[in-house]
Amino acid sequence: MVGKRIALVCIVLIGGVTMAFKIDFKLKKEKTPTASEDNAPIVVLELFTSQGCSSCPPADALLQQAKDDYRNSVYALSYHVDYWNYIGWKDPFSNPVYAEKQRKYNIKFKNRSNYTPQVVVNGKAHFVGSSAVKMKAAIVEYGAIKAENRITLSNVKVEKESVFFNYKLNGAIAKKNFRAVLVLD
C-alpha cells in the first residue's frame, strides 16, 4: 500500500442537504501518511449494478467515464447486488450487503423496489445509471455544494490493511450524520 494515493471520502448529511469532501493522503515508506485537508466538495456516485443485468454495462462504462473525466472531484463506487444471481449467472462480485444498502436508500427515496442500474449521488438523489445527461447534471449540481463543516484528521496510522485515525468535525453538527469511506484507486 506504500506509495499509493489514498482518499478518505467524507459525507456529511445535513437535513435535506448532503455535502461531500475528500482528504487525500499518500503513504510514505515508514507508513506515516501525510494529509492534505482542503475539504473541497466532491461528488460520490454509488452505482448498484450486476453482471446478470443486461442494462448495466452502459452504466458501468458511464461511471468509469465520470471517474476519468472528473478525477479530482468524483468518487465512483460500484456495488454488485446479488438479486440477479437467480437467473443462472452468479456475479462473483455480488454481495447481499449491497442489495440491503440499496434497499435502505430506496426506502429513504420512497422507491417501491430496488433496480439496476441505479446511481445514488451523495446519498441524496438517484437516477437510472445509464443516463449521461442526468449524471452530468448531478455532478455539476452536487459538485457546487460547499461544505459547511471542516474535518481535521490526526493520528493517522496504517497497520496491515487497516487505517486508523482521529477526527474533529468543526461547525454545527446537530442533526447531522458522518460517513467516511476509504477509497483506494
Image (tube, grey):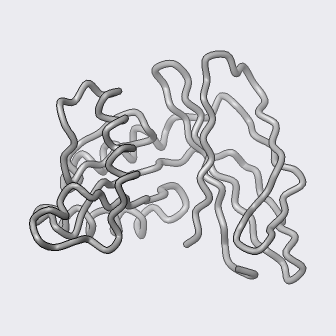
Q: Which corner quadrant holds the C terminus?
A: bottom right
Residue at the spot 52% in from the left edge and 55% down from the top edge:
73
The quadrant holding residue 110 is top left
**Residue 172 sits in quarter:** top right
Viewer-side residue, 158 vs 125: 158
Which quadrant holds residue 48?
Answer: bottom left
* Image position of 29 (left or right of 63): right
Work out whether residue 153 or residue 147 is closer to the camera in this orientation and state it: 153
| In the image, residue 98 above or below residue 27 | above
Q: Residue at x 83, y 46 (%)?
A: 166
Seen at 42% across and 65% down, the residue is: 67
The spot of residue 169 in percent (x, y) is 76, 33
**Residue 179: horizontal and vertical position, in percent?**
60, 41
Front in this rendered view, residue 135 or 56 = 56
Query: In the picture, which quadrant includes the N terminus?
Result: bottom right
Q: Residue at x 50, y 65 (%)?
A: 71
Q: Is residue 47 above or below residue 13?
A: below
Front residue of this view, candidates 5 and 40: 5
